[in-house]
Image: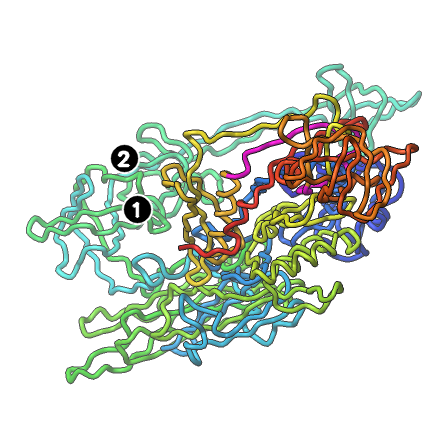
Amino acid sequence: MILVYPSTLEGEPLERHEVFEGTLHDWMLANVPDYAAADYHPVSATVDGVVVPPEDWNTVTLDKTIELRPQPGDPVTIAYVVVAAVIAVAASIILAPSIPSTSNKSSRQGRSLYEVNAQGNQAKLGDLIPELAGRHRMYPDYLNAPRRYFIDKTTQALDMLLCIGVGEFEIALDEIRIGETPIGALGSGIEYEIFQPGETITSHPAYRCWYNTPEVGASTGSSGLRLRSTENASYDGAVSASGNRLTFTVPENWEEDQWLSVRLYRPVTVINGGTETTETEVVTAATVTNGAQKEVVTGVTVTRDPATGEITAVDQTTGNVYDGAVSDIQTKTLTQATELPDVIRGDWTGLNVGDRIRFSSEDLSGTFIIATLAGNDMTVTSLAGQDVTGLPPGDYIAAVDLQGVRYRIIEIDDELGYIGVQRLDEDDNVDGRWSSFPAFSGDGNISIVSDSPGTWSGPFQACPDDEETNRIEFDIFAANGLGKLNDDGDIRNVQRTVELQYRPIGASEWQSVTRSFAANTRDQIGWTFGVTLSESMTPEIRMRRTTVEDTDTKALDKLDWYGLRCRIPHKTRYADVTTLALTIKGSNTLASQTENQVSLVPVRKLPVRENGAWAPAEPTRDIAPWVAHIARDAGWSDDDLDYSELDRLDAVWQSRGDTFDYVTDDDSTVKESINRALTAGFAELTIDKGKIKPVRDEPRGELPQHGYSAQNMLPESFSRTITLPQPDDADGIDVEYIDEESWTSQVVECRLPGDTGARVENRKVEGVLSKTRAWRIGMRERRKQRYRREAYEFETELDALNSSYMSHIAITDDVPGYGSSGLVTSAVSVSQGIALTLSEDVDFDPSSNQVLAWRRPEGTLSGPHVVLSASGNVVVIDDDELPVVDWSMEPPYYQFGELERWAYDALVQDLTPNGFESVTVTAVNNDPRVFADDDSEPS
């Protein structure tokens, strides 16, 4: 059993194939076009929830359930495994021809045109790769994360690798922009290369994939992680604590925002936890019966099943299981003494079970985890989780606080001699659980925490969990410059050093790398350093200054850890898609915010048709090549398309300047995608006689194709409905489109005389970039609303299957004042034309312009022809085609009347077979006023 799903999401399968013999490889080979054994396919196969790699498909038998799902990350727009489903849908349309409606409103809208977040480069993981039709502005998607680095200390560069889209393109230099500036105007600050599908891209450095560590880098209000360093300063003496305030003699050079270590010494008593004795009874020997022989064994483990009482003996040395009866069990009692954890008594306000705490005193120090708390009594474990015993009993003076906490000064009152603080956790974030110290008065130690050296920024994991790297880069940035002012105003050169340490995730030992740099400038400067690791690993990284920050007012010495990235595996070519590689060098020409504002306006290259045959691919905005591309990409052959009609419409569209310019990155169906393009040319997709056929709603200067009258309608099946204007009808259409100059959404008003615009219908047109063409489409719809108000419905036997969607037909009923109909019983050639004998007399008026049309055996209509004369049921018409009257088949039907009223001029909208017995036809009136603005211009 094979189940084919439309995507990787939850849902029902699109297809079920009841096959139980052979392998998955055999089935794919027989059913999927262009399939061949390979290491990769754009579809996954799973059996019992486990993905089977393609190399094993020839061993997967079909006697189990296999689930096939297209993979969204593959560059192919339509997964080829679903082609069979598309063809199956087409086949159902052919067998039961349900013809599209006139509204042609796609059930989905392409996201690229109207979403605000599309106006910038993005990483679209697992999304469909964009496809371009014609010419349109695109913001290519990231293939790698952008890499920002310093070429030298005053010049920053940005490498970007972008996916333009599926296929090949014509791209002019002035159509590639950063922000709104063509890259040609940016001079040597831009280096770029465009790579065609499948080309090797290693000639540009952007091909390398760098992972940017998110915890390191610029953020709001900061250019990176500050590498801090301050001189040590401490206070020892009397301290009192209340709330979040510490009262003591505050040193003069202390400032707000400095970080503190606070030790408040309190009485602590250690009490020996004692011991606990346990007794255990163990088996020393037993008698085991093996068949008729009894055997005394020692060193056995004897167990008793609590449910059955059955006793089993297992030899601990050999592992043998004795199945026979066990008796004469001999045991002995073992006594074991276990030390209980020591109890530490003190004031533990603000502490909780599970906290890591640090004891600081001369006689009692260490880091522990609180195991239990009962009032003022506490037991602790080591950091490894073992109960702490054996502490020397007695009374101590010790400072106790959470491990790693620090306090930030938030206020200083020199007159009253106190500071207010916040507590910071191990990650240097404000600890929301803490609001105040326990009340205290006694000895304490309060000191400024030194960041140079000894306090690290990090560690941070520098690589994704499932990746390894052996090469990293890090950036140091001096936002205010680096150096020291001399008394004469010159800036003295200073040198600084940073230390970076790395280790594999989970390891304990760090490896160190130091880098030094120097400068004497007020300008912002930066450095990028590369490090080759000792081995491939998933590393964690930390960094610190090893030179103390000079806080003198003349010093420029603030350093930020500006970036950290690692190089991970990358591709050297991308099949099926065109890529753009850029290096942007920083200057005053470019703002840093434009790094995700790379856009271009390419033109898609597609095969075109010339003189009824395919020509090589060329840049084209035409509708027909795109329609053919979608159909062929979905798996249809040229024999499946009605190219005679597509070629005819291609000539029409080109003569009118109708184009289709669109970027699609959604999961529209083949039908939706083709109809979206055809709509730009007033056309729709249908299936006619087994072929994909575009049908254009256009002026019908030709004669009707088929005729329907009482002779081939089922009795009493005809109805005619006229929809009169209603008060709530729309009196105008506003059409939203994308303007090809500004590439923004614009609206054009479409109004007929008398429209006030009080009840406007809003529509969007996709793939149309011209105001004039958008207006023409809107005016066509508005005119259809006003002038196509007559609907017809009738049934025939199978005659109506001669017609198709938008067929031009003539309908005659028995309403007085309109046409009449009947049978042609005989026909002969005469000097004036053709003399027809009819089954009914006609009311001939020589002063009026009367016509007659007749139906050929294959269902097409001949005429209408001018009636030259008539007498009774004999009519002479101006024609040289002689009707075939053969009573072994249906005779010709005729339709007769005045030229303007001989039949209802109509367009077929739908054909619905009712089994094999009859066909229901719906149609609308054909009014030439619908097309009056097809070549007009908006005011």
**Relative horizontal placement of residue 619, taking residue 523 as reference (left or right):** right
Expressed as whole percent of the image width and height from the top left, the position of residue 391 reads 39, 41
Expressed as whole percent of the image width and height from the top left, the position of residue 363 reads 32, 48
Residue 436: quarter of image = top left
Instruction: Find residue 430 and name its label.
Output: 1
Of 333 and 488, the residue lying toward us: 488
Three-letter amino acid code of the residue under disc 1: Val
Three-letter amino acid code of the residue under disc 2: Asp
The colour scheme used here is rainbow
Of 813 and 412, the residue lying toward us: 813
**Relative horizontal placement of residue 831, taking residue 562 as reference (left or right):** right
**Can you say which quadrant of the picture contains the C terminus?**
bottom left
Expressed as whole percent of the image width and height from the top left, the position of residue 483 reads 26, 77
User: Quick one: SS at disc 2?
Assistant: loop
**Relative horizontal placement of residue 398, taking residue 213 as reference (left or right):** left
User: Quick one: SS at disc 1?
Assistant: loop
| Magenta stretch holds residue 788 | yes
In this view, the residue farthest toward the left is 415
Of 525 and 281, the residue lying toward us: 525
Asked if the residue at tag 1 contacts the one at tag 2, i.e. Cβ–Cβ closer than 8 Å, the answer is no
**Can you say which quadrant of the picture contains the N terminus?**
top right
- Magenta-drawn segment: 787-808
Task: Confirm whether residue 595 shows in the render.
Answer: yes
